């Protein structure tokens, strides 16, 4: 051991003007269930374990701009979601409430925006 204490990444937290609404979008997209829900906070658990997704209400939330534009709020992170069938996954994401981003940087990747503007990528390996 290198002296580091044991650490386990348990989740990623996305800010939102309405945590419950954004969590509902990701439930539709991923099919994950809520494992915790209270005022301003929702946790979705990944099936089979691993890091989940959490959502917290942030009253001062500012929607990020992607791709980045000087002087505008920039994304600080994005989600990468591997899929087997890119076309089917894109159709599903759109039905769930995502918006296809105007700029698409790669052939095997599709960038979408969730209802609050967080970018996420669907990709085939």
Image (tube, rainbow, N blue to C red):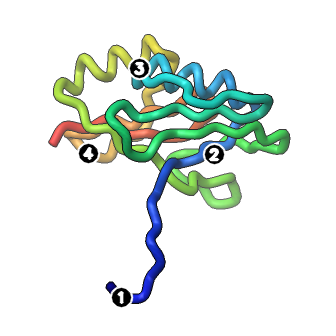
Q: Residue furthest right?
A: 59
- The residue labelled by disc 2 is 64
Q: What residue sits right under mark 3 in the picture?
A: 31
Q: Which residue is mark 1?
A: 2
30 over 120 or under it: above or below: above
Q: CA distance from mark 3 to mark 4?
A: 26 Å
Upstream in the sequence, badge 2 or badge 3? 3
Estimate the spatial distance between the alpha carbons at disc 2 and disc 4, rounded to whole Å: 21 Å
Mark 3 vs mark 1: in front = 1
Q: Which mark is residue 63?
A: none
Q: Which residue is labeled 4 in the image? A: 106
Kind of element beneath mark 4: loop
Query: Looking at the rendering, in which quadrant would you find the C terminus?
Result: top left
**First in sequence: mark 3 vs mark 4:** 3
Q: In the depicted view, which residue is nearer to us: 27 or 93?
A: 27
- Number of dots carrying numbers: 4
Q: Is residue 95 above or below residue 125?
A: above
Q: Could you tell me how far apart the alpha carbons at marks 4 and 1 are, in whole angstroms?
A: 38 Å
In percent of width and height, residue 87 lies at 23, 21
């Amino acid at each position: 051991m290198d002296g580091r204490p044991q650490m386990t990444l348990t989740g990623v937290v996305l800010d939102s003007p309405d945590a419950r609404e954004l969590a509902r979008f990701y439930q539709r997209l991923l099919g994950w269930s809520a494992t915790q829900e209270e005022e301003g906070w929702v946790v979705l658990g990944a099936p089979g374990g691993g890091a989940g997704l959490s959502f917290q209400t942030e009253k001062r939330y500012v929607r990020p701009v992607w791709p980045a534009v000087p002087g505008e709020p920039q994304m600080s992170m994005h989600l990468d979601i591997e899929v087997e069938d890119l076309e089917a996954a894109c159709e599903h994401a759109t039905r769930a409430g995502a918006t296809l981003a105007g700029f698409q940087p790669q052939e095997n990747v599709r960038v979408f925006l969730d209802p609050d503007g967080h970018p996420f990528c669907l990709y085939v390996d």
